[in-house]
Amino acid sequence: MLDIQNITKTYGRFTALGGVSLQAQGGEVFGLLGPNGAGKTTLLRILATLLSPTSGTATVAGHDLTRDPEAVRRIIGVVNGGMGLPARLTGREVLRSFAGLYGLSREHTEARIAELDDRLELGRTLDTPAGEYSTGMKQKVVIARAVIHDPAVLILDEAASGLDIFARRTLLDFVTATRAPGRLTVYSTHVMSEAEEVCDRVAILHQGQLVRVGSIPAILQETGESNLERAFFALLRGGDAHAV
């Protein structure tokens, strides 16, 4: 579902990503981990066709990012912590608008809204103007908007940022439920406990470099640590980069 080969992104003399290669399979929740500035958002923006790599190649569900970006955009959904909503529109109006952009019929749209209401507990967000939303309410509708067309690949970039404990729990439960054959969720975070709960495998980035790719049990076993946060620091102290 995702094949990244030697992706590099530079800005003048600054290297935001330095030759990152990794693969992720259908049926996975794949974590992209690292501190702020590690290169996670840069990589995800490249995968979302919002940035072009300086060098390297990548395919999403078999579609080349640079050769067929429109095909990639049709099969992905993207959420980050800073996305906005039109203040005057209700959640239902936002979802109907985006469903129309993807060519969903009226019947299909209403069925998807009902399904997402159940899964994300949208509640009164559907009929309340977005200008009156709390952070958690807004993020739920942003997520619903990103998946209204039922994308094969969902990219979540620090999606839990700023959420209260209830909205965060709804998000993590939703991410867990996205795991299905032929589908991939990429979950980017600097909060290791979130990744430990929802991810099957993770890639750890630091200063634009890939430090490890592997399952969480394998990384814990290699480092001899009891949790992913401790393992993360152990790997950074080691200072090398290879796949587990």
Image (tube, rainbow, N blue to C red):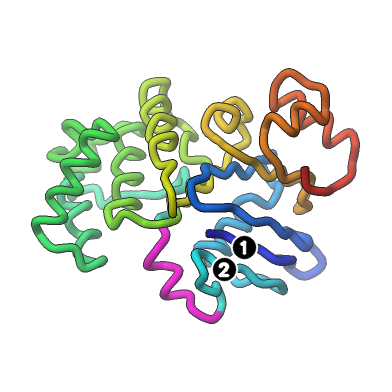
Task: Give the camera-side residue of 24 and 241.
Answer: 24
Task: Look at the picture and state if 126 lies above or below 217.
Answer: below
Q: Position of residue 241 (x, y in %)?
A: 84, 48
Q: Is residue 70 magenta?
A: yes
Q: Position of residue 35 (x, y in %)?
A: 69, 39
Q: Report the number of numbered marks.
A: 2
Question: Decide: marks 1, 2 in contact (CB < 8 A)?
Answer: yes
Disc 1 marks which amino acid? Answer: Asp
Question: Is residue 15 in view from this perspective?
Answer: no
Tell me which segment is drawn in magenta. Answer: 67-76
Q: Is residue 84 magenta?
A: no
Residue under label 2: 59
Task: Look at the picture and state if 32 lies above or below 105.
Answer: above
Left or right side of 19 for 168: left
Task: Give the camera-side residue of 118 and 143.
Answer: 118
Quadrant of the rendered structure where residue 47 is?
Answer: bottom right
Residue under label 1: 3
In percent of the image, x 55 and y 29: which residue is there?
Answer: 194
In terms of secondary structure, where does tag 1 sit? strand
Q: Position of residue 185 (x, y in %)?
A: 48, 47
Q: Position of residue 65 (x, y in %)?
A: 55, 72
N-terminal of the two: label 1 or label 2?
1
Task: Give the camera-side residue of 14 and 160.
Answer: 160
Disc 2 marks which amino acid? Answer: Thr
Left or right side of 179 for 203: right
As drawn, which residue projects farthest toward the left? 107
